[in-house]
Amino acid sequence: LKIKDVLDGKFYSSYAHFEWIGASSVGMNTAAGIDILTPTDSYLTRHPLYGYYEIKSITDESFNLNLTQSHSFVYNHTQYPISSFLPRPGPNLTHAILTTNSTPLWRHSSLAQYWLLDLNTGLTEPLTQPENRAYLAEWSHGGEKVAMVIDNNVFVYSLDSKVKTQITPDGSRDNNDLLYGRPNWVYEEEILQTNKALWWSPDDTHLALLKTNDSQVFSYPLTFYVPSSDGTNAYDPAYPSVIDLKYPKPGFFNPVVDVMMYSFEENELFLLKPSEETNHENDLVMEIKWMGSDNLLIKYTDRYSDLLYVDLGHISSRSRNNVRSFNVKDLDGGYVEVTRDTLYVAPTDSTEEGYIDTIIVDGYNHLAYFSPLSALEPSQILTHGEWEVVSKVGVDTETRLVYFVSTKKSSLERHLYSVSIDSSATTTRNLTNISLEGFYENIKLDSSYKHALITYAGPDIPYQMVIKLESGNVLRKFDTMNQPPISLTQYDMPLKIYQTIPLTDDFMANALEIRPPNFDTNRKYPVLFYVYGGPQSQKVNKRFEVDFQSVVAGSLDTIVVIVDGRGTGFRGRSYRTAIRDKLGGLEASDQITAAKIWAKKPYVDSSRISIWGWSFGGFVTLKVLETDGGATFQYGMAVAPVTDWRFYDSIFTERYMHDPTTNREGYDRARISNVASLANNTRFLIMHGTGDDNVHIQNTLSLLDKLNMGKVENYDLMIFPDSDHNIYHHNANYIVYDKLFSWIKSSFD
C-alpha cells in the first residue's frame, strides 16, 4: 500500500449523483405538447460516461428523460460547461437552474453564474451575468420564482414576468459590512454550515431571510503571495493581494443578525423583532424553520451557548414571541449543541400541528414531539436510552412516523430507524440491518415517504441503495468507488482492531488499533497516534477508510492508534461536555493515558511513539507534546494547528471556553506556551498554509516567536504559500502528505 495510491484517489468512494424528483407533469420537448408524468420514485442523476443529466425511475427501468443533452450548452455562440453541481429542476419541472463559472469562496460558499433552462424548448437564458455572479439561486416551492443573492442583496426572479426584483435595500456592494440572504464567514462555518440564509414559505407568499451586520466586526488580513494564472488575486506581481476577512474573535464584536421577512403580496420587507425579555444583541440564530405558511420557528442562543431560546414568529402580526427557553449550563455545565433539522408536523383531522425537536433526555440527545407549536414542554418524548439520535431524516404526516439515524446499536455505527409520534411505547423500528455492522449516512427520503436513498459507508466497501420504507427491502443498489471497482486483494491491507480503554474510573474511550500486515506479536513496533479530538467529533467508527493511517501501518511496519477521548461525540453529554472552559487539558491527558497503555504492550517499542493531527488535532498534538514533555511521546506532527484560542473565531471558541475576560485562566492554560517542555521532545514538525481562512497562520507564527524566545530548535517547519485550511494549492496536498510520511519514516528509522 503506497501513499500515491491514496492521494490518487484509488480508494475514494465516488457516490452517484442522485436527487429525488417525485411525481410531476413535464413537457420535455414532447410532440404536440403532450406532457409526461414522472413516477413518484423518479430521480435526477448524471450519466456516468457522457455527463448529461437525466431523470430515471427506481422501479420502472424503462423510464428515462434527458434533462440536458450534454454536460455543456451554447449561449450567444459561447460554450459553457455545466459545473459539477446537479441541475436543479423546478418543482413543476418546466425549468431547471444550471450553474457555470463557479469559484469557491469558503467551506460551503461560492460565486457562480446561474442560468434558467427551459425544459420544453431546451433554450437557456442567464439569471445572472458573468460580471455580476451570485452567491446562490433558490427555487420557490411552486417553481414560479427564484431567489438569488447578488452583491449581498436578495433578488427574486419571476418566471411569469421575466423580471428580477431587488427586495433588500442596502446590502453592501463594495464590502461585506451588511449581508442579506447569505451567511457571513463565521455563520457559514460554525452555525448554518451552508451558503444559504433565506427560506421560502410553503405557499411562496413570504421569504424569510437573515440580515447580518458585520460593520463592527474586525477584519483579519488574509494575504495571498502568488499571483493566480488569471490575475484575480494580483494587484501587481511585486505586491501581495489582501482580503480583509470579517472574522470575529473571542471577546471582540460579533455580527448582529436579524430575522427579516419579505411579503410578496405587500412588496415589503420587515423585521421579526424578538420580544424585549429575550432581545439580546449578541444572540446567535441557530435555526429557521417554517411551521406551515403562517408561522416561523426561530431557535437561538446567547453569545456563549449557555441558554437556548425557541421563538415563534407570526406572519399575520409581524411579531415573534418566546415559547420556551432552557438553561443548558445549569443542567450539566455544558453548551447548546447546534441542530438544524427540526421537523414540522402538519395537522390532521384529529391532531394539531407540531414539530419534532432534539432535546436532552437523561444526558443523551433524543427526539421529542411538541404540539401545539406554542407548547412549553414536549407532548411526547419519542426516544430514550443510553444512546444518541444523530440526525432527523423526515416525518410522514400520514403515517405519523419519524425517521432518524442513531447510535442505538453502537456508538461506532449508524442505523436508520423509525418511531411513531402517537405510540406511547416509543418503540423504534430498525430499517437497516442491525445484525451486521453498518455505518449508514446521507439518507434522503422521497416526497411520498415510500423510498429512501441510503449510503452504506462501511465497514466494507461503500455503496448506495434505495430501500422501500414500508418493508426495508432493497430496490436498487448503486456501487461506488472507482470504475471498475478496485480489488482490495491486490494490497496487503492493515488489520483494524476495535476496543475500549479506561481513561479514568468513570470514562472508557473507543479506540482503534491499526496493525501492519503480517503483524507479529514477537516483534517490537513503533506507534503513531492519530488525533482530531474536537468537540462532538468522531474518528473511531465503522466507516470504510483506506487513508494516510492505513499507508503508515501498511508501508512503515507501524502500529497506528486512534482514540476518541473526552470532548468527542456520540457518547452522551457527560463525555462531550467535560472539556467545557478547559480546551486542551483533558484532550491531551487522554491521549497520554492511551499512549502509556500502548507503551506497556509487549509488541510496542516504547522509545518510538509519535502523534499527529490536523486543525484541532494539530492543537491537541502540540498540547500533548507540551504536557508530556517527552516522557511518553518522542515525536509529533502538527498541521494547521490552533496555538492560542484567542486567535480562533468567537462562535466556536466561546461555545466551549466562554469569554477570555471571564475565563482568562482557561485560555492561558489552553495556549501552547511551555516551549521548554516542547524542547524535551526528540523532534516535532509544524506545517501551515498562509491562506488559511479558518485557523490563521498567526497561530503558527505566534508559536514560532515563543520558540525563538526560548531558543528551541528541535522542530521542522513547512509553509504552503496561499493554501487554505485544506492545504491543496499548487500541489500542496501531495507535498503535505509526502512530507508527513517521509518525516515519520525518518523519525522511526
Image (cartoon, rainbow, N blue to C red):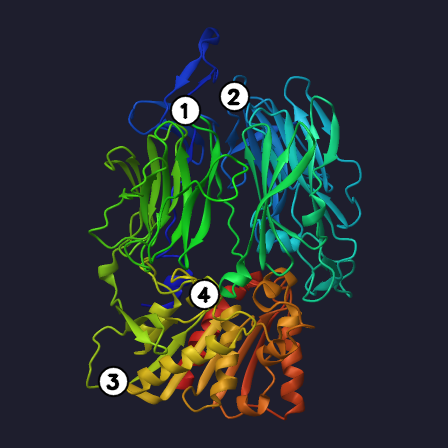
Q: Tell me the CA gap for discs 2 and 1.
A: 41 Å
Q: Choose the circle earlier in sequence order: 4 or 3.
A: 4
Q: Which residue is mark 1?
A: 350
> Secondary structure beneath disc 3?
loop
Q: Amino acid at mark 1?
A: Ser
Q: Give the residue at the far top of this rendering.
A: 32
Q: How many tags in the picture?
A: 4
**Mark 2, residue position:** 119
- Residues under labels 4 and 2: Cα distance? 50 Å
- Residue 204 vertical position relative to residue 287 in the rendered view, above or below: above
Above or below residue 336? Residue 680 is below
- The part of the image, by quadrant, that contains residue 524 is bottom left
Residue 569 visible? The answer is: yes
Q: Earlier in the sequence, mark 3 or mark 1?
A: 1
User: Badge 4 is on which residue?
Assistant: 576
Q: In front here: 218 or 313?
A: 313
Q: Is residue 530 left or right of residue 316?
A: left
Question: Residue 528's x, y, as percent?
Answer: 38, 78
Q: Nearer the viewer, mark 4 or mark 2?
A: 4
Give the quarter of the figure containing the N terminus. Answer: bottom left
